[in-house]
Every structure is written in structure tokens, then in C-alpha cells.
Image (cartoon, rainbow, N blue to C red):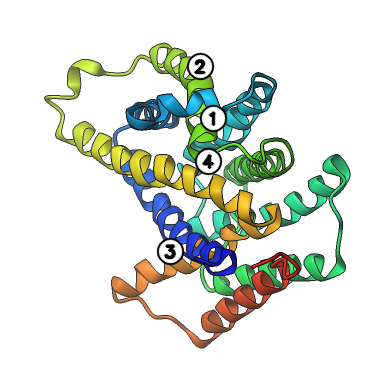
């Protein structure tokens, strides 16, 4: 498969997986606290990746482990808890808009910290994509007043984490297999997640007697398998064959997927939302590195 086609396929598949993850997180929070959900998600994913990831660890050079640990925390550990906390309060439309800031942060951090080239066409593409996100959720977008609005800072913090992660993946871990990076990440954050789970006093005895708890754990297993284990490996591969900004532009497509689920539930899709989708596609096309060999 040509690289150009492959990276668009990865972007499309990851958009569907991660765009659906918000629903699974909401379902999981029915019986779990944010700290419990984040920890269980990390531990389940570690177990899943361990089934076929051990042999990959030897492909990670000793000097690269520092970056493996850092990307483990910034790419997975912190965002897992930040989004779980945020989704207890803020609207999904607001989360989508705030998450749409990730490509801009990625572009700026890449320029200031990793000496990547800052092309005006990419800046314009990032802004067009962000405007498309605003247009797409304009009918539902609300900013809540009071203390609850502070929860939006959790999403912004998560976007900064993602931006740091994707730049390190591209500029410090290039050439290391995607599965090796993913499993190395989760090996690095398993112990802290386990400590947090025991501190928050997880109700182990209720798993077999509480239908609500077992159902929530079922949703988190799906989230861990598809939205974390498989998606992380695919995303690492996407970063290796494209640019950091193109890879992280996936955040623009997440509200499209969310609205798509709404259509399946007989919700209306307006002409202004179609316009927002068009803006997003146009913006991502501008971000695409066309100078790369096919």
C-alpha cells in the first residue's frame, strides 16, 4: 500500500475508534470514578499488549528508554485521567473544540523544541481545521459558567500532553517498531496506575455481584482493546509514516464520528455541519506533507 493511501486509511480508522471512545468512557463512568477508570484502562491495555509484545521490547535501544517512559506518561498516563475527569462535567462538544487545539500545539512545540520547519501553509491548514471543528459543533457548543468550566482545563492539559508525545515519537523514537513503543509505554506506566487503583480502594468484591460495575468494566475492556491497545500501535505507525501535525489532525475528525453516531440514532445533520466537515477535510489536506515520497 502506498504511504499516501496508508496514512489516510490509518487516519480514517483511528478517527472511528477514538471518536467512539468518548461514548465508552461515559459508559464506564456510570460505575467507576475517573481515577478507577483511568487505572483499569491502563492495566487492561498492558495485559492485552503483553500477549504479543514481549519480544518487541528487545528492539528498543537502551538510550531510547528515557523517551519511551516520557511518551508513556504524556501520551497515555496523564490523558487517561484528565479526560476521565473532564467527561464527568463538560459537554462532548466543548471537549471536541478544545481537543481540536492539539494540532496547533503540536506545530508550535515542534518548532520551538524540536526545530521542525514552520510552514505557513500548515499554520493555515491547522487554523482551517480548527474553524471546521467550531462550525461542526456550533449548534451544541456551550460554555458553562462557574467552577465546572475549570474542567475544560483538563482537556487543554491533555492536548498539550498529546502534542509533546507526538513530537517525541517523530523526532526521538523514529525507526523503533510501533508495537515496541506501545508496549514499552504501558510497561512504564503500569506500576503508577496500579498504585493509584489501590489507593482509591477499588471495590473488587462487587465485580461479581454488581451488574452496573461489571457492565462498566465490559465497556472499559472494549475501550482498552480497541481504543487504546490497537489504536496506540496504529497511531505510532501513523506518526512514523507521516508528520506529527498530520497524525494529530485526527482530533479534527472525532466530532464528525460523534455526530455520525448521532445520525444512526436519528439525529439531524445540518448543512452548516456538512460545511464544517468540508473545512476539516480541506484543512487536513493542507497539513499533509506532499513532498514526501509515495
In which quadrant is the C terminus drawn? bottom right
Question: Which of labels 4 and 1 is toward the front?
Answer: 4
Crowdedness of circle 1 by 10 Å Cα count: few (<14), some, many (20+)?
A: many
Q: Secondary structure at mark 1?
A: helix
Reading the chain from its start, which is encountered first: label 2 or label 4?
A: 4
Q: Which mark is residue 258?
A: 3
Q: Which residue is mark 4?
A: 178
Q: Quadrant of residue 172?
A: top right
Q: Are marks 2 and 4 in contact (CB under 8 Å)?
A: no
Identify the mark at residue 77; answer none if there is no mark: 1
- At x 69%, y 42%, the residue is 160
Q: Work out whether 262 lies above or below 193.
A: below
Q: Nearer the viewer, mark 2 or mark 3?
A: 2
Q: CA distance from mark 1 to mark 3?
A: 24 Å
* Distance Cα–Cα, label 2 vs label 1: 9 Å
Per the image, label 4 sits on a secondary structure element best described as helix
Residue topped by disc 2: 192
Amino acid at each position: 500500500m502506498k504511504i499516501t493511501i496508508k496514512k489516510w486509511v490509518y487516519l480514517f480508522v483511528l478517527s472511528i475508534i477514538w471518536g467512539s471512545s468518548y461514548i465508552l468512557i461515559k459508559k464506564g463512568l456510570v460505575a467507576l470514578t475517573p481515577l478507577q477508570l483511568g487505572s483499569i484502562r491502563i492495566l487492561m491495555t498492558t495485559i492485552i499488549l503483553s500477549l504479543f509484545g514481549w519480544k518487541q521490547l528487545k528492539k528498543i535501544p537502551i538510550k531510547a528508554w528515557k523517551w519511551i517512559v516520557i511518551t508513556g506518561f504524556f501520551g497515555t498516563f496523564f490523558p487517561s485521567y484528565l479526560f476521565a475527569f473532564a467527561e464527568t462535567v463538560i459537554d462532548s462538544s466543548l471537549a471536541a473544540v478544545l481537543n481540536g487545539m492539539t494540532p496547533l500545539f503540536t506545530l508550535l512545540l515542534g518548532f520551538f523544541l524540536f526545530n521542525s520547519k514552520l510552514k505557513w501553509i500548515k499554520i493555515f491548514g491547522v487554523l482551517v481545521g480548527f474553524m471546521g471543528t467550531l462550525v461542526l459543533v456550533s449548534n451544541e457548543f456551550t460554555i458553562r459558567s462557574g467552577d465546572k468550566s475549570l474542567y475544560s482545563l483538563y482537556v487543554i492539559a491533555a492536548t498539550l500532553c498529546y502534542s509533546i508525545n507526538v513530537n517525541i515519537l517523530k523526532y526521538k523514537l523514529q525507526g523503533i517498531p510501533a508495537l515496541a513503543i506501545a508496549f514499552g509505554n504501558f510497561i512504564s506506566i503500569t506500576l503508577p496506575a496500579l498504585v493509584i487503583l489501590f489507593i482509591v480502594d477499588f471495590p473488587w468484591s462487587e465485580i461479581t455481584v454488581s451488574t452496573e460495575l461489571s457492565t462498566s468494566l465490559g465497556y472499559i475492556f472494549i475501550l482498552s482493546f480497541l481504543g487504546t491497545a490497537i489504536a496506540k500501535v496504529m497511531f505510532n505507525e501513523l506518526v512514523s509514516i507521516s508528520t506529527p501535525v498530520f497524525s494529530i489532525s485526527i482530533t479534527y475528525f472525532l466530532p464528525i464520528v460523534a455526530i455520525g453516531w448521532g445520525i444512526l440514532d436519528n439525529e439531524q445533520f445540518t448543512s452548516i455541519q456538512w460545511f464544517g466537515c468540508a473545512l476539516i477535510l480541506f484543512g487536513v489536506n493542507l497539513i499533509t506533507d506532499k513532498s514526501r515520497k509515495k
